[in-house]
Structures are given as structure tokens and as C-alpha cells.
Amino acid sequence: MMDLEMPLMGGLETAKQIRGNDQYKKHHHTPIICFSASLNTEQQQELKAAGMNGFIFKPATKDQIFETIDRYLN
């Protein structure tokens, strides 16, 4: 799970780096879940194209976070 807005590299660029780096190919099934305050449909599509698997919108409850993570573990 990563925030979309991070100090050194944003979530979009980070997802692109992870998904495009040969070093991480053996982990290509590991989900990346975006944690963000708001995303429109176009942004969600761009993030999916970059390799994000899902989204959690702020503010999120602990239960919402765990339910989303659990969806990708099973």
C-alpha cells in the first residue's frame, strides 16, 4: 500500500518503477494498493495502467484498509 503523494517520488512513478524493473519481476503478482484522498476515473485508469491493483480512499477506517488488503491476499 502506498500513498499517491510522497516526498521523493509519487505513487504513480513508484508503481511504474516497481512494475518496470527486472529486479522485481518475480514479485509481479504482489499487489500495489494506492492510498489517496481522491481520484477521478481517469487517474484511476492511469494508475492501473502503471501497475496499481486497487485503491483505498482517505479517510479510511481500519476495517476498510484490512478488507481491501485481504481481498488481494486471497
Image (tube, rainbow, N blue to C red):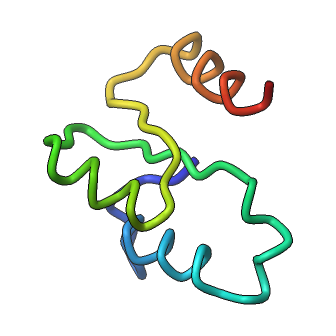
Tally of numbered discs: 0
Q: Residue at x 80, y 24 (%)?
A: 74
- The spot of residue 35 in percent (x, y) is 42, 42
Q: Residue at x 58, y 52 (%)?
A: 32
- The spot of residue 46 in percent (x, y) is 28, 60
Q: Residue at x 41, y 79 (%)?
A: 9
Q: Residue 40's image quarter?
A: top left
Classify residue 15 as left or right of residue 35: right
In the rendered view, tell whether residue 12 sits above or below residue 29.
Answer: below
- The spot of residue 51 in percent (x, y) is 50, 62
Classify residue 30 as left or right of residue 47: right
In the rendered view, tell whether residue 5 sits above or below residue 35.
Answer: below
Q: Residue 8's image quarter?
A: bottom left
- The spot of residue 54 in percent (x, y) is 48, 39
Furthest-top residue in view? Answer: 63
Decide which of 21, 38 is in the foreground and name it: 21
Decide which of 63, 44 is in the foreground and name it: 44
Decide which of 17, 61 is in the foreground and name it: 17
Decide which of 48, 18 is in the foreground and name it: 48
Furthest-right residue in view? Answer: 26
In the rendered view, tell whether residue 44 sits above or below residue 27.
Answer: above
Q: Residue at x 32, y 30 (%)?
A: 58
